[in-house]
Image (cartoon, rainbow, N blue to C red):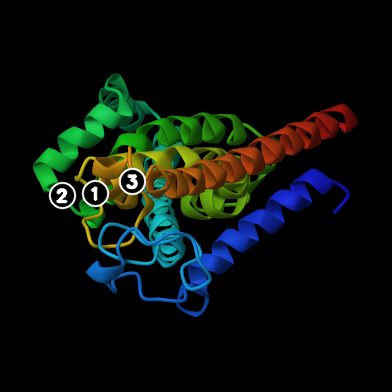
Amino acid sequence: MKDKSLLILYILLALIILSALFAPLIAPYSPYDADLTNKFAPISQSHILGTDHLGRDVFSRIIYGTRMSLISILATISIVLILSLIVGSIAGFRGGLFDSILMRICDVFLTFPTFILALFFIGVLGVGLINVIIAIALTHWAWYARIVRSIVLETKQKNYVTAAKCAGSSRFNIVIKHIMPQVLSQVIILATLDLGHMMLHVAGLSFLGLGVQAPVAEWGVMINDAAPYIREHPELMIYPGLCIFFTVAVFNSIGEKLRDKYAAVNSYIKQEN
């Protein structure tokens, strides 16, 4: 509460989440209701941001697009964290042959640019939201797995972990009770910094026609739909573009704030010890 800037960022994030949760109550129209007699309508009381080339209310589609964008990135980051925590914990705690094999697999995934690798997976899996989520998750998990492994390698040398081993605790209990809290506290901050990056991936793939498919209301799809009319009606691309920019900025700012605070806390603890 003392950090006013972080508090403002939390409020902005809460507004984004609430707009996604209560989209049916906020949006004045269905995002799929088309009215060709009212296409490209200007801003008015009945249409806050006007209408698109099919006469659909732009404001309603943006509100519903918030829901779709948040669902996609939360599903992606959940898959990434589950894969990376499992692989990184096994590699770091067991070591030996398991560590070598798993890290070489990670090296293969890290060799290619994430967006190019995502395009390859989409080419194999096919287009669609679920396949895009899987593709983006498969391109990001390796980096997180290596970070988890490094944290596990450092944490398992601590005295309280050694004491737990001497007390007869199983490997599973040691990882869950003593190592995983240390891992999660750092990985979640990194994930917060990466949410904006993943949102750009989802929107970019949807813009290329490989992700969310029309007529689903999603910001990347809206930009793709408005591209042929950019000269006559540039605002149809500007509105969803600003939403992407604003949401990515909020995620990145929160992640940086949390990272700085966590670094300060760690520095204080080391000084006290």
Quadrant holding the N terminus:
bottom right
Mark 3 lies on residue:
223
Q: Nearer the viewer, mark 3 or mark 1?
A: 3
> Which numbered marker is on residue 211?
1
Label 3 neighbourhood size at 10 Å, few (<14), some (14-19), many (20+)?
many
Q: Judging from the image, what secondary structure is the residue with disc 1 in? A: loop
Residue lying at 55% horizontally and 38% vertically, measured from the top left: 193
Q: Identify residue type, mark 2.
A: Val
**Picture coordinates of residue 126 (x, y %)?**
11, 48
Residue lying at 49% horizontally and 31% vertically, measured from the top left: 147
**Picture coordinates of residue 180 (x, y %)?**
56, 48
C-alpha gap between disc 3 and disc 2: 18 Å
Q: Identify residue type, mark 3.
A: Ile
Rendered view: 264 above or below 67:
above
Q: Which is nearer the eye, 91 or 31? A: 31
**Picture coordinates of residue 200 (x, y %)?**
40, 39
C-alpha gap between disc 1 and disc 2: 6 Å
Pointer 1 or 2: first along the chain: 2
Rendered view: 157 above or below 10:
above
